[in-house]
Amino acid sequence: MTDEPADSHTPDDGFDDAAMEQAPRARRKVTPIVPPQNVAGRALVLVIAIMTFLSCLTLGAVTLVRDTASVWENQISREATIQVKPADGLDMEAALATASRIASEFAGVRGTKIVDREATTRLLEPWLGAGLNIDELPVPRLVIVTIDENSPPDFEAMRAAITPKVPTASLDDHRTWVDRLVAMAHTTVTIGMGVLVLILAATVLSVIFATRGAMAGNGHIIEVLHYVGAEARFIAREFRRHFLLTGMKGAAAGGLAAVIVFIAFSWWSSRNLATPQADQATALFGNFAIGASGYLGVAIIVLVIGALTAATSHFTVVAYLDDLDPHQPDGI
């Protein structure tokens, strides 16, 4: 009986050695340097969304105050008021007519209008009630002077001309009120921008802590890659890509929430135009519409926070790698 080689009857099980070697490679997944979304990552998205929401609300509020103050300033600067106080022996109607005639003679005055008795009564009804007889009270009467904004009259000369003819009359050009209004608007804008800077600074700090946390969890991998020759720009790029996506997700969510809030306030204002509450709110803040510039500002805030998140993670990684090997800095 002839001995046959041991491998002469090797069963054909249908597997190719080369295929068996390549199969593990095909099944092997490339693990990213930065861990995928985990609890910390989702928390960072939420933090960025909240920061973006607050930033957009701040920017919207600043835009709203600025636009409303501009409307107030334009409305006030188009008019001046002559107030005639009652006095013993004063013919009120004649005094009003005299003040109106003198004011209309000045260059830069487009017209004058005497506020009649009925209109004066309506103005006082919210405070003194209906059925008021203004003849029984020392109520001053008004003359509205419409002026040319581009070429206003000489108010000092107008005062000097009116006072001798109507001693109880006083001219108010609203300059003091306009100056205070402009100062208030500028102060509000400055405070709002300061709050916006603080929110962005808090966002940067949050991203720094998140980046350092991600690097601490994968510090051994990063150090091995760095010491075997991986350039800092490669490692930083991986972190930058990851945090850019994270930042954009959170910023987009926060910006969308802010837009919904602005639309909701605008809708509420349009639905309640006839109510006293809405009238007061509209008088103070307009119709709560931030306009195209406001929505453009929201989009810019979203892009800035996304870019800021990516840039912050990039420089944090670079600083970390420089600390690992200070004598051999990688070109960035």
Image (cartoon, rainbow, N blue to C red):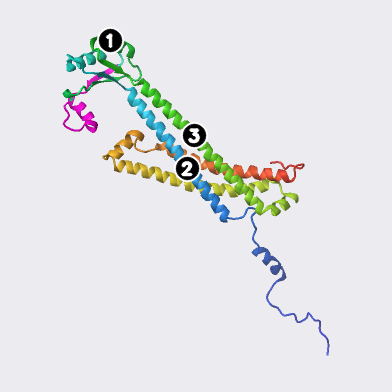
Whether residue 294 appears in magenta in the rendering, the answer is no
Mark number displayed over residue 54: 2
226 is higher (above) or lower (below) than 112: below
For the view shown, which residue lies furthest in the bottom direction? 1
Instruction: Check disc 3 and give the amino acid type.
Output: Met
Which numbered disc flags the more N-terminal residue, 2 or 1? 2
Instruction: Report crowding for label 3: few under 14, some 14 to 19, many 20 or more residues within 10 A (C-alpha).
Output: some
Residue in the foreground of this view, choosing between 227 and 316: 316
Instruction: Report crowding for label 1: few under 14, some 14 to 19, many 20 or more residues within 10 A (C-alpha).
Output: some
Mark number displayed over residue 193: 3
The residue at the point 19 percent across, 28 percent down is: 121
**Residue 69 as seen in the image, left or right of residue 234:** left
Query: Disc 2 and disc 3: Cα gap in Å?
Result: 12 Å
**Where is mark 1, residue-wise?**
161
Instruction: Check disc 2 and give the amino acid type.
Output: Leu
Callout 3: SS: helix
Whether residue 121 appears in magenta in the rendering, the answer is yes
The part of the chain drawn in magenta is 109-133
> Looking at the figure, which quarter contains the N terminus?
bottom right
199 is higher (above) or lower (below) than 189: below
Residue 307 seen in this snapshot: no
Instruction: Check disc 1 and give the amino acid type.
Output: Ala
Residue in the foreground of this view, choosing between 201 and 4: 201
Which numbered disc flags the more N-terminal residue, 2 or 3? 2
133 is higher (above) or lower (below) than 52: above
Residue 37, image x and y in percent?
Answer: 57, 55
